[in-house]
Image (spheres, rainbow, N blue to C red):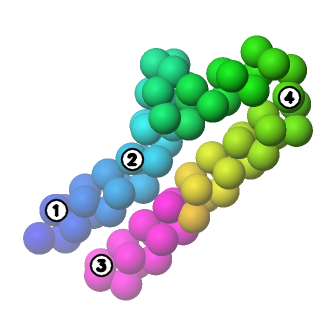
């Protein structure tokens, strides 16, 4: 059971990173907006998008670690 919980929380934490990378490389979702902002040289928008992706990944990692620590 702890192994299943550990794996589940790990996947919970890795999903935002995977989806960000896939959307950026595939120009879908947030990647489409990021690519449009880069092409139009809107660096303020690019930086906001990167900060939001970074914040989302940090929060998901923190939540995952807290859940894993509380359960295990």
Name the residue that disc number 1 marks.
Answer: 4
Name the residue that disc number 2 marks.
Answer: 15
Quarter of the figure that contains the N terminus? bottom left
Q: Is residue 30 magenta?
A: no
Specify few, some or many for label 4: CA neighbours under 10 Å numbering under 14, 14-19, or 20 or more.
few
Which residue is more in the foreground, 63 or 31?
A: 31
Nearer-N-terminus badge (2/1): 1
Distance from the alpha carbon under mark 1 to that under mark 4: 44 Å
Distance from the alpha carbon under mark 3 to that under mark 2: 21 Å
Figure check: 61 above or below 72: above
- Across and down, in percent, residue 3 comes to 19, 62
Q: Are marks 3 and 2 in contact (CB under 8 Å)?
A: no
- Across and down, in percent, residue 63 comes to 48, 71
Q: Are marks 4 and 3 in contact (CB under 8 Å)?
A: no
What residue is rendered at 71% in x and 42% in y? 49
Name the residue that disc number 3 marks.
Answer: 72
Which SS class for mark 2? helix
Relative side of 29 to 33, left or right: left
What residue is rendered at 46% in x and 77% in y? 66
What residue is rendered at 88% in x and 38% in y? 44
What residue is rendered at 46% in x and 48% in y? 16
Nearer-N-terminus badge (1/4): 1
Specify the farthest residue to the top.
Answer: 39
Q: Are marks 2 and 1 in contact (CB under 8 Å)?
A: no
Relative side of 20 to 12, left or right: right
Figure check: 67 above or below 14: below
- Across and down, in percent, residue 72 comes to 29, 78
| Magenta span main SS | helix
Please name which of the two marks, 4 or 2, marks the residue nearer to the observer.
Answer: 4
Distance from the alpha carbon under mark 4 to that under mark 3: 45 Å
Please name which of the two marks, 2 or 1, marks the residue nearer to the observer.
Answer: 2
Q: Which residues are magenta?
A: 60-72
């Amino acid at each position: 059971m702890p192994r299943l919980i550990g794996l589940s929380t790990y996947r919970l934490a890795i999903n935002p990173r995977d989806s960000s990378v896939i959307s950026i490389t595939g120009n879908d979702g947030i990647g489409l907006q990021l690519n449009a902002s880069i092409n139009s040289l809107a660096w303020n928008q690019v930086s906001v998008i990167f900060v939001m992706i970074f914040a989302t990944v940090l929060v998901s990692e923190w939540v995952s670690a807290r859940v894993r620590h509380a359960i295990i």
